[in-house]
Image: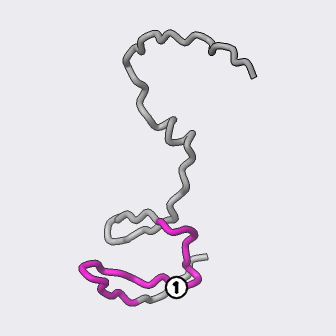
Amino acid sequence: MNHDRRVRLFRNGRNQAVRIPREFELPGEDAIMRKDGDRLIIEPARKRSLLALLASLEPLDEDFPEIDDPPPEPVDL
């Protein structure tokens, strides 16, 4: 499904822009753009889950102090 379509480039302030035709519309409001030689590649930005974000973080190499955590006092209602 390789469709070619000629599009016009235009200026939007100091940026060069291109209007994406409906048949090439991407989902969402964000995209990833990268350059591969003379080609520009635009892909939808994938939503990252909290678990994926946490898995990407480096582990902490420090010991945390022990904290005295007694059970709460009973409350008379």
Quarter of the figure that contains the C terminus: top right
Residue at image x 35%, y 81%? 17
Q: Nearer the viewer, residue 31 or 5?
A: 31
Q: Nearer the viewer, residue 58 or 36?
A: 58
Whole-percent x, y for residue 10 in the image: 33, 88
Whole-percent x, y for residue 18 in the image: 39, 83
Dividing the picture into quarters, in which one does residue 71 lie? top right
Residue at image x 58%, y 10%? 70
Give the secondary structure at mark 1: loop
Residue at image x 55%, y 82%? 3
Q: Nearer the viewer, residue 68 or 26?
A: 68
Residue under label 1, please give it.
21
Q: Is residue 57 above or below residue 7?
A: above
Q: Residue furthest right?
A: 77
For the record, the magenta segment spans 8-30
Total count of labels: 1
Whole-percent x, y for residue 49 in the image: 57, 47
Q: Is residue 72 left or right of residue 16?
A: right
